[in-house]
Image (tube, rainbow, N blue to C red):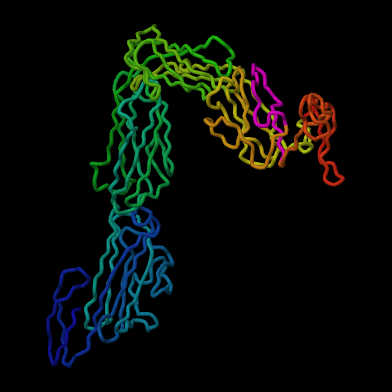
Amino acid sequence: PASASYVNQASWTYRYRPSPGAPKVNASFSTNSVTTNIIRLETTMSIVNVALAPILNLGTEMTFTTKVANTGNINTSGSSLTNLIPVGALYVAGSTKMNGITLPDIAVAGPFVLGGLINSPGRPAGQINAGEEATIVFKATALILPAINLAVIDADGGGPVLPLNLRGSVQNATTDLAITITNGVNSVTPGTNTTYTIAIKNNGPTTVDSVNVVDNFPATLGNPVWTPSTGTYNAGTGDWTGLTLASGQTVTLTLVAKVAPLALVNVVNTVIVSPPSGVGDSNTSNNTATDTDTLTFVADLGVTQTDGVTSVNAGTSHSYNITVTNSGPGTLSSVVLTDTVPAFLTNPVFAPDEGIYNSATGAWTGLNLATGQSIQMTLSGTVSALATGTLVNTVVVGVPVGILDLNALNNTAVDTNTIVPAAGVAGNVYLDANHNGIFDGAETGTGLTGLYVKLVSSLGGNALQAVAVNATTGTYLINGVLPGTYNLLLDNNATLTDVTPALPATYIGIEAAATRRDNVLVAITNIPGQNFGLWRGSKVSGTVWNDNGIGGATPNDGLQSGTEAGVAGATVKLLSGATALDTAISDGSGAYT
């Protein structure tokens, strides 16, 4: 009842709301005493679906909660609750609790079907203290919908406060399912597969555990394969179960089907979605979706290629003849020809005998290729001088967009050739430990980085190649050298325009030509042994001669003059104390180094 106070009144009439949101009603009360204290109860009833929240289907277990709060300023006594089993529901035995404590049932019914005292936590039966509340919970299973719960709250037992009536109803669940379908294209080709994505979105407020999707499968489609993103889909019944489709979420159903090879009409695929039994759909305008595709045309293109040989020489020019044939049934104004040009074929040039060819895109346009006709194209280039292994050229022909090639087995042609490699020039830049000007097997590299050997044509010009010398082993290798005559230069950089050889600082060349090997003749075989011997130090050179004064010279003056002749075959030793550091034999003129 509404709050009120009164003094020495015989009776009065007042208005109150029996439950929150209910219309106000009239009530009266009589007394011969002065009353300033009041009891004021406010009640609420809520229903929770605990099994499949929040959509309620038949057979779902529900939880009913009734709260009775004393918002007055005195405690109640004799407060009671009468709650019959909800209409359309089956009571779950042993499920009633008051303030969290389980209460015994009356036979197979709840403890309040015949009425019972209620109290706030820890208070005597029937007493709800001011500012406290009693909470009563029980469960029931839905048998029919709506399920209606009726409860009567009496604040003071036989006292003057009138009972309050509560009513709660669980209605049929509703949702808003929307469906779309697309295969991502506007046209399909007979005889090929197409993939549809069917999306179901839940625009409603509640979770759905199943849907029904019916596909009005057209005769122009066959061999369907259905794949749901989640759950299990039965294409025969349309039932899609095992879902947990919450509000705002989407699930997808993928359909792969083959367009009939002899299809003559557009492919129209319509799908319809509906909610599970017992659940309504608040918006049926989005329950149907359709995908429509036109048909494409067909053709049969084939490609061949040949270069007339089985092997090619590195560094030589080479060409392929490529032929595209249209076996019908229609005339084509363009084709797509993709050529995977081998990496070893440099500076490729395509020359079609008809139309315009774009090697970047593969588009070959401006044609009039009727059934049974062929067109040719020539691909030419140069086999890299560094090429090794095999030279493989692969061409693939394709029809324009919107046309189907009925036979894909003749759309690819491969030509493979063995590469005859160009010669290699190799050698060692070594530390000549014994100063003999000969690369001995145990001698190694100088340990210096930044040494290069350059290949220069004997006719002059810039270097053709510059390769690094292995600092540890001293080895170097120049591959892909075409037949010819070359000079090899030892240098401290890899700049091809620099053809002036140079030794590393503090090093000398031991062999006769310290920094170059001239007129190296290269044919088709490798040229090894092009060595450079180095030593970190200085040279001592001179002449052994017969200081005999011949030819007007002064004998024994320590100067070679007149016609004094050199002494060949003399042994000259370089000593450090008694230790011989090196030995040289004078040549025919007496010179030694």
Give the residues drawn in magenta, as a range.
511-535
Does residue 525 show up magenta in the picture? Answer: yes
Q: Quadrant of residue 252?
A: top left
Extreme residue toward the right, this view:
578
Seen in the picture, residue 346 relative to 375 is either above or below; the reply is below
Does residue 362 show up magenta in the picture? Answer: no
Extreme residue toward the top, this view:
372
Given residues 300 and 69, the one toward you in this image is 300
The residue positioned 80% from the left and 31% from the top of the image is 554
The residue positioned 55% from the left and 27% from the top of the image is 463
* Image quadrant occupied by the C terminus: top right
Where in the figure is residue 221, as x and y percent of width and height?
36, 25
Q: Quadrant of residue 190?
A: top left
* Image quadrant occupied by the N terminus: bottom left
Seen in the picture, residue 214 relative to 522 is either above or below; the reply is below
Where in the figure is residue 304, as x and y percent of width and height?
48, 12
Where in the figure is residue 530, as x and y percent of width and height?
69, 27
Where in the figure is residue 589, as x and y percent of width and height?
78, 25
Horizontal arrangement in the rendering, residue 373 relative to residue 282 (left or right): right
The residue positioned 41% from the left and 65% from the top of the image is 108
Given residues 240 and 308, the one toward you in this image is 308
Given residues 10 and 443, the one toward you in this image is 443
Given residues 290 and 119, the one toward you in this image is 290
Q: Is residue 444 visible?
A: no
Numbered marks: total: 0
Seen in the picture, residue 192 relative to 91 is either above or below; the reply is above
Seen in the picture, residue 97 relative to 245 is either above or below; the reply is below
